[in-house]
Amino acid sequence: MILTGPEIDTAVADGRLRITPFDPKQTNPNSYNVRLGATLLTYATEVIDAHHANPTRTIRIDTDGYVLQPGELYLGHTVEEVGSDLFVPLLFGRSSVGRLGLFVEITAPIGDIGFHGQWTLMLSPIRPLRVYAGMKIGQIMFFVATGDVEPYRGKYQGSAGPQPSRYWRDAATAQAGAS
């Protein structure tokens, strides 16, 4: 089951769902709009190595916006901190943003029960596109889980701002286990 807009508002009010800051005007019939934060990251090397931490470059979106370029992966973040110990969140790009040629969160839309923090957004434009901090960039839907819940305790818990991949930590653990 998916939460309806009124149930999202109720779940925020009674603490089953945390959205900070929360604005009921951002609630849709069955989702909640999230906004783009003011910081972007890009990887600073031509080749990204999955088994190592990769250097990044920080970009601040000023009041004139920032033009995203095709062929570049940008890591953005939500203004809102979103999380729940009961519901499964799924984040998708808004259709209005998709119609501008911006792919948002195509490969990793699902969040874990128990995650609380700002969401890192994977942004990929198909042509140059000016974006602005605070623009509605995506929407999160919340699903009811059935069965026992094991809350998320992973490497991105409590994220603030865009987070580069920490896949290399998984690779290091796998390599240590293979030894």
Image: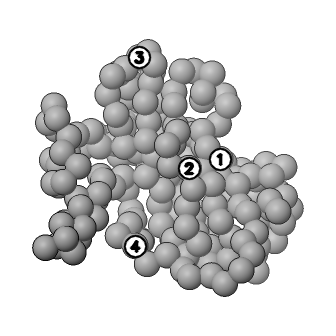
**Mark 4 or mark 2: which comes first in sequence?**
2
| SS for dot 2 | loop
Q: CA distance from mark 4 to mark 2?
A: 16 Å
Circles 4 and 2, Cβ within 8 Å, touching? The answer is no
Amino acid carrying mark 1 in the image: Gln
Measured in 3D between alpha carbons, the distance from the residue under mark 3 to the one under mark 2, in whole angstroms, is: 23 Å
Q: Secondary structure at mark 1?
A: strand
Residue 108 shows which numbered tag? Answer: none
Q: Amino acid at mark 2?
A: Pro
Disc on the earlier residue, 3 or 4: 3
Residue under label 3: 128
Dot 3 falls on a residue whose secondary structure is: loop
Alpha carbons under labels 2 and 1: distance apart: 10 Å
Q: Quadrant of the N terminus?
A: bottom right
> Residue placed at 79% from the left, 48% from the top?
28
**In contact (CB < 8 Å): disc 4 and disc 1:** no
